[in-house]
Amino acid sequence: MKTCIGSALVAAAVLLAGCGSGIPLPDPDWEQHGGNAIVIGTGADDIWFPIRSCQDAPAFHHWDGGSWTKVVATGLQCAASSAIAGKGKLWLATGTRLVVMDSDGQLEDRGPATGLGGDASYTNVWARNGFAIIAAVKPAATPGGVATNLMLATDGATFREFPSPEPQSGITDFTVNGPDDAWAYDRSTPPPPSQGLGSASGPVEGPLHYSGGRWLPTRGPRLPVASGFDPGTAWVLGDTETDGTVLPLWHFDGSTWGWFGAPLPPLLEGEGTMSWMLTPAPGGFALLGTQTSTTVTDGVRSILNTTYAYRWTSDGWSDPEKVVERYAAACGDYVCGVRIDGVLEDGTRVFTHQASGEDSTLVTWKP
């Protein structure tokens, strides 16, 4: 087993050891998230952490590689959709405002550049690698007329109308990779694993893929897509509880989905349950497997989470690489706290195991 103890970070009640790097969580607002939080950014020195408890305007914590800064989008409505607009910058879409905000909280209005007029509204934004898709509503041209839902695409400088997927009913979210690579799917009601993933012999109707200037239906998994490093590729990991020997994994090679069907990585030593996170990596993918074990000593319950990285190669699975090991807070028979996760634009995975208390940290690991 590979370990990288040189990057260890030790704090009270928390042990970090392995190849992952630790970042202290912003304090104190992160605890107001409730169940979980998704972080976004361009890399380990540019991470945006949304603050859900919006008071008067959308707010974020921004990590610049050395410290956290609270950034408030003063003047915007709370219900803002956000996406990366470049290093140290965010797209924010809310109401009649479409802006780019920098890490100092400075806002640049981009609505006028869309050409939709001052009464247009902007409901959502998705972006990656300098390319963004924006959902907008153009007001009716005449009194009593009907407003028009449309999508816009931009490289940050100019805007153009972008084809909307048809039919639009049931589409709730998008994964954007670039000007000729995007996915549309319904994540509001995820199907059961057997229906959402299909099988090696029988794929189901899957997400829509944008390529070649149009949206095309695919036959594959009806689950959120993890984009690959290579343009046009993608991966989907199903429910690993459905089979104890085969990894329920699908791969999109640029034209069709294929059942990958790799065996699960070798079981680790010791007892405990395993959970998995799929992370696209150059030339394929990696799995982050977290082993959770529980011990009781003198009536005190301890929950230890140890995360290992496995890389898939032409020869099969690599040896496990220890990424992080830490103790989690226990609330009765359960682990309590906030689960934080995200994949940054450079492929860095950011996560923590049910963080709680002042000693918790974000872990960053790059394939």
Image (cartoon, rainbow, N blue to C red):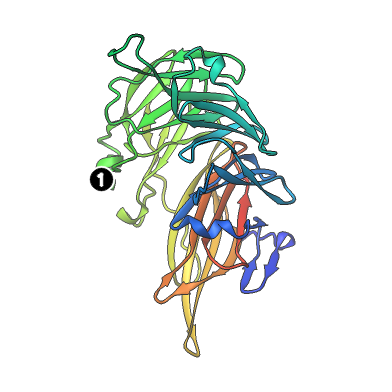
The image quadrant where one finds the C terminus is: top right
Q: Residue furthest top?
A: 142
- The x and y percentages for residue 347 are 59, 40
Neighbourhood count class around disc 1 (C-alpha, 10 Å): few under 14, some 14–19, many 20 upward:
few
Q: Residue at x 67, y 45 (%)?
A: 44
Which one is nearer the viewer's eye here, 47 or 56?
A: 56
Q: Residue at x 54, y 34 (%)?
A: 83
Q: Could you tell me if residue 31 is visible in this image?
A: yes
Give the left or right position of residue 178, taking residue 214 as reference: right
Residue 299 position (above or below residue 251): below
Q: Residue at x 70, y 63 (%)?
A: 8
- The x and y percentages for residue 335 are 45, 69
**Quarter of image, res 7:** bottom right
The image quadrant where one finds the N terminus is: bottom right
Q: Residue furthest front?
A: 143
Q: How many marks?
A: 1
**Quarter of image, res 205:** top left
Residue 298 position (above or below residue 304): below
For mark 1, give the secondary structure: helix
- The x and y percentages for residue 52 are 49, 49
Residue tagged 1: 194
Q: Disc 1 residue type? A: Ser
- The x and y percentages for residue 267 are 46, 62
Q: Could you tell me if residue 254 is visible in this image?
A: no
Which one is nearer the viewer's eye here, 333 or 81?
A: 81
Residue 154 position (above or below residue 125): above
